[in-house]
């Protein structure tokens, strides 16, 4: 296994880690229902499943 010859300084280590950032997911507002949801994801509104503003699956009403 490879071993470093010298200790990497805190500055050098932290410079490398600056690119690892947590980003907030991009949100969209549905034109049909008006709910806020994550892009490219299906979302539930009152038990019904929507995707791109279209009803994909209705809630099963068991009586």
Image: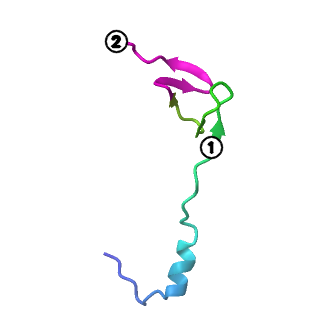
Within-10-Å neighbours for mark 1: few <14, some 14–19, many 20+:
few
In this rendered view, identify the residue nearer to me: 27 or 5. Answer: 27
Tell whether position 14 is magenta. Answer: no
Residue 15 picture quarter: bottom right
Q: Which residues are magenta?
A: 45-63
In this rendered view, identify the residue nearer to me: 32 or 15. Answer: 32
Q: Quadrant of the C terminus?
A: top left
Q: Position of residue 31 (x, y in %)?
A: 69, 28
Q: Residue furthest left?
A: 1
Vertical order, 5 against 29 (above or below)? below
Residue 61 picture quarter: top left
Q: How many marks?
A: 2
Q: Residue furthest front?
A: 63
Q: Are marks 1 and 2 in contact (CB under 8 Å)?
A: no
Q: Position of residue 25 (x, y in %)?
A: 58, 49
Q: Position of residue 7 (x, y in %)?
A: 43, 89
Tag 2's secondary structure?
loop
- Badge 2 is on which residue? 62
Mark 1 vs 2, N-terminal side: 1
Q: Quadrant of the N terminus?
A: bottom left
In this rendered view, identify the residue nearer to me: 38 or 13. Answer: 38
- Badge 1 is on which residue? 27
Residue drawn at (49%, 88%) of the image: 9
Within-10-Å neighbours for mark 2: few <14, some 14–19, many 20+:
few
**Closer to the camera: disc 1 or disc 2?**
2
Q: Which mark is residue 42?
A: none
Q: Is residue 55 left or right of residue 61?
A: right
Tag 1's secondary structure?
strand
C-alpha span from label 1 to label 2: 33 Å
Q: Position of residue 48 (x, y in %)?
A: 49, 22
């Amino acid at each position: 296994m490879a071993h470093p010859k010298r200790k990497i300084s805190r500055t050098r280590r932290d410079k490398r880690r600056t690119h690892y950032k947590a980003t907030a997911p991009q949100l969209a507002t549905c034109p049909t229902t008006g709910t806020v949801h994550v892009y490219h994801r299906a979302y539930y509104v009152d038990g019904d499943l929507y995707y791109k503003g279209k009803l994909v699956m209705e809630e099963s009403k068991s009586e």
